[in-house]
Amino acid sequence: MTRKILLVEDDSASAAYVAKGLQEAGFAVEVCGDGRDGLFLASEGIFDLVVADRMLPGLDGLSMLGALRAANIGTPVLILSALGTVDDRVKGLHAGADDYLTKPFSFAELLARVEALLRRADGAGAEPQITRLSVGDLEIDLLARSVTRQGRAIPIGGREFNLLEFLARHAGQVVTRTMMLEKIWNYHFDPGSNVVDVHIGRLRRKLEEGFDAPILHTVRGAGYRLSLDG
């Protein structure tokens, strides 16, 4: 089931960037740019999560949040704000926010926090620490930074290893170019380059040449998926 996120952000460029990244990650996103409209939409109780800027026209983010909690709407809320002092963050959490992220932020961190809040809302526990990853017949040793497939060593280093680890941690899921750009290259905007596709092409050749089954798949218009199941 697709999770629904309400994004309340009055800066159109920032809203478009965050909404695009969340949609690429598989979420349904509705955007509004006014605190009063955000309160109205969030009060409907149909969203799994609200991501809201703190400084909004109409009604500021903390007032919107306070009104939601006063109405016993328990939808998790993540506050985004350029106000990042300890006092600012404490005020946000005291107002009822479940998390508080200071601008500028990494989209990868925002996505991780969104997923953590949704897991918490679902009652799931924390992910265990792992040192090895397996995807079908592919084995990745995170400590030795070594890779084998069907027991055969595959030399992969540098950013291609980081890219493979990131894909393996999301095995079976679509990983978007936006996520890879931010996680591996620390780009917080789309530079319009083909750096991801170039590295994916090299990685695919190393992982698949000499083996019968493909394991790194292109998902048209979305990104890539590491899986033996196609």
Image (spheres, grey):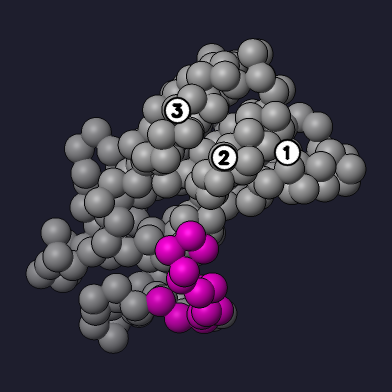
Horizontal and vertical percent position of residue 148: 34, 79
Left/right of residue 38 with respect to residue 211 in the rendered view: right
The residue tagged with tag 2: helix, strand or loop?
A: loop
Q: Is residue 207 visible?
A: yes
Q: Which residues are magenta?
A: 120-133
Sequence order check, earlier mark of 2 and 3: 3
Left/right of residue 187 with respect to residue 199 in the rendered view: right
Characterize the magenta stretch by its predominant secondary structure. loop
Residue found at x 76% / y 29% = 82
Q: Nearer the viewer, residue 160 or 83?
A: 83
Q: Which residue is mark 2?
A: 71
Q: Is residue 94 above or below residue 191?
A: below
Horizontal and vertical percent position of residue 213: 12, 67
Q: Nearer the viewer, residue 163 or 21?
A: 21
Eye-nearest disc, 2 or 3 = 2
Eye-nearest disc, 3 or 1 = 3
Q: Is residue 27 above or below residue 34?
A: below
Q: Residue at the front extreme?
A: 71
Q: Is residue 122 above or below residue 87?
A: below
Instruction: Calculate the distance from the C-alpha at mark 2 to the C-alpha at mark 3.
Output: 13 Å
Horizontal and vertical percent position of residue 66: 68, 37
Q: Which residue is mark 3?
A: 41
Instruction: Calculate the distance from the C-alpha at mark 1 to the C-alpha at mark 2.
Output: 26 Å
Decide: few, some or many residues near mark 1? Use Cα within 10 Å; few <14, some 14-19, many ≥20: some
Instruction: Calculate the distance from the C-alpha at mark 3 to the C-alpha at mark 1.
Output: 24 Å
Asked if residue 123 lies in the magenta stretch, the reply is yes
Q: Which mark is residue 102?
A: 1
Residue found at x 30% / y 56% = 173
